[in-house]
Amino acid sequence: MSEWEVFSIKYADRNARTRADSFIFDDNHDAPHEMDYFMWLLRSGDEVILVDSGYDDAEAKSRDRPIRRDPGAALAPFGLKPEDITQMIVTHLHYDHAGGLHLFPNAQLHMQAAELAYATGPCMCHDTLKMPFTAGHICEAITRLYSGKVTFHDGDGQIAEGVTVHKIGGHSRGLQCVRVITRAGWLVLASDASHFYENLWAAKPFPIVVDLEDMLTGFNTLQRLASSPNLIIPGHDPLVRDYFPSELDDFIHRLDAGPSKDVAT
């Protein structure tokens, strides 16, 4: 089985937030708690898979959450242009993971059927549940669907040899993580199944949640899928940049060889 290189690509951050924004149950709720925003790139020979699309400058202005770099332009250090991406795993349809779908016009989108059903269903009548979604991003996913550019998965699915997706739910109804074989073993991109290492290792749920039981069960699933705790990569934790070495540019970190020191669990 071919091993994959795996890279995190930081395109934004949001630092004016507190621990209350990251954990439902936390006594130190007023303490500052920074958040990074990532996409991920998988590479094996000439084969490239992008995981999530980030969001663009228009969405940044709409939500007053600036980006540091355009997600399409962020691929330049790999020698790639947005139109070179032909396969994209969409972990879920929240704005920060699917807000740049239009930037990658040639990408076949891989998502859970449950996620699109959730994002277009009765739950979106509730402002609290629809807050992380943007209607235009969902319309883009539907346009891709009608163009034959969406592949749906129901639970576990294979994207390529050594790359699988696994439905988690919890944070969003059809949230999926990504499991990748690397030289260090099976690595799991948790995406928002665990925003931060602390969500997972302290079993502290993130406040944006549609099913709390699924979120908690998902923590166990992440551990089962990964070869070691060091190979579970949370979706928004700045500590990823401390644990893993940068490569190609200061906003890109190489994940597939494992961390430079053991992850605190």
Image (cartoon, helix red, strand yellow):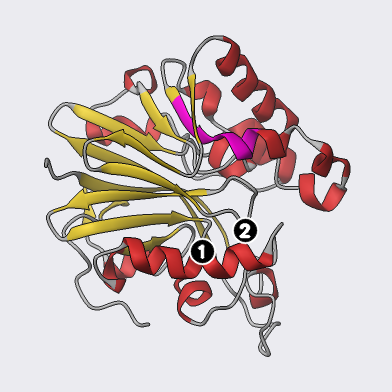
From the viewer's perspective, tell me whether residue 196 is left or right of residue 182. right
Residue at the image position 12 percent from the left and 40 percent from the top: 2
Q: Are there few (<14), some (14-19), or many (20+) residues within 10 Å of tag 2?
A: many
For residue 101: magenta? no
- The kind of residue tagged 2 is Gly
Mark 1 highlights which residue? Answer: 218
What residue type is disc 1 on?
Answer: Gly
The spot of residue 81 in percent (x, y) is 33, 22
* Magenta region: 109-116
Q: Judging from the image, what secondary structure is the residue with disc 2 in?
A: loop
Question: Element type at marker 1?
Answer: helix
Dot 2 corresponds to which residue?
A: 170
Q: Quadrant of residue 158?
A: top left
User: Is 110 one of the magenta-colored residues?
Assistant: yes
Instruction: Report whether 19 appears left or right of 233.
Output: right
- Residue in the image at 53% along x and 73% along y: 199
> Which of the pair 255/141 is nearer the observer?
141
Crowdedness of circle 1 by 10 Å Cα count: few (<14), some, many (20+)? many
Q: Earlier in the sequence, mark 2 or mark 1?
A: 2
Determine whether, in the image, residue 246 is placed left or right of residue 26: left
Residue plotted at (49% across, 37% down): 90
Q: Quadrant of the N terminus?
A: top left
Cα distance between the residues tagged 2 and 1: 7 Å
Residue located farthest toward the bottom when viewing the structure as drawn: 27
Q: Quadrant of the C terminus?
A: bottom left
**Circles 2, 1 touching at the beta carbon (< 8 Å):** yes
Q: In the rendered image, which quarter is residue 146 located in?
A: top right
The answer to whether residue 199 is left or right of residue 43 is right
